[in-house]
Image: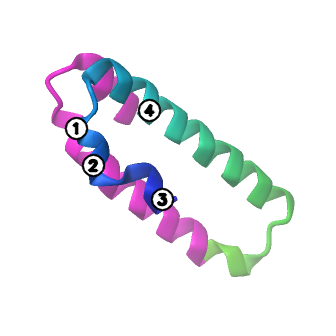
Amino acid sequence: MKRLVDPSVADLPSNILAVYLSAALKVYGYWASVLSEKWSDQFLPVLKETVAQLRAGFQPFASNEDVEVQERVR
């Protein structure tokens, strides 16, 4: 999941960045749904860490000049 929010994606054009961020959230959603199907309390720290990574990685895009990009991360 760390790769999904690599800072280098900030260099992408805004229209591509918006699509990229949307796709990253879909990948996370799929991963979380698979995790929920085999849920065990041992997965909670992994889930919390992944959410923290995504939030931290998306934070810089919340102030992007393109509204489409902002909407993807809020």
- Image location (x, y in percent) of residue 14: 26, 23
Where is residue 2, by image quadrant?
bottom left
Q: Is residue 16 left or right of residue 62?
A: right
Contact (CB < 8 A) between labels 1 and 3?
Answer: no
Q: What separation in Å lies between label 1 and label 3 (alpha carbons)?
A: 23 Å
Across and down, in percent, residue 23 comes to 53, 33
User: Which label was assigned to residue 8?
Assistant: 2
Number of the label disc, if any, that sits on residue 20: 4
Q: Position of residue 18 (x, y in %)?
A: 37, 25
Q: CA distance from mark 2 to mark 1?
A: 6 Å
Q: Is residue 59 magenta?
A: yes
Q: Residues within 10 Å of mark 3 (few under 14, many from 20)?
A: some
Q: Amino acid at mark 1?
A: Asp
Magenta residue span: 45-74
Amino acid found under the numbered disc labelled 3? Val
Q: Earlier in the sequence, mark 2 or mark 4?
A: 2
Query: Which element carries disc 3, helix, strand or loop?
Result: helix
Judge from the rendering whether residue 8 lies leftward or rightward of residue 18; answer left or right: left
C-alpha gap between disc 2 and disc 3: 19 Å
Residue placed at 27% from the left, 52% from the top? 7
x and y, in percent, of residue 26 in the image:
60, 37
Residue at 44% across / 32% down in the picture? 20
> Mark 2–mark 1 contact, CB under 8 Å?
yes
Measured Cα–Cα span from mark 1 to mark 4: 12 Å
Sequence-wise first label, 4 or 3: 4
Query: Which residue lies under the disc numbered 3?
Result: 51
According to the picture, the residue beneath numbered tag 1 turns out to be 11
Q: Nearer the viewer, mark 1 or mark 3?
A: 1
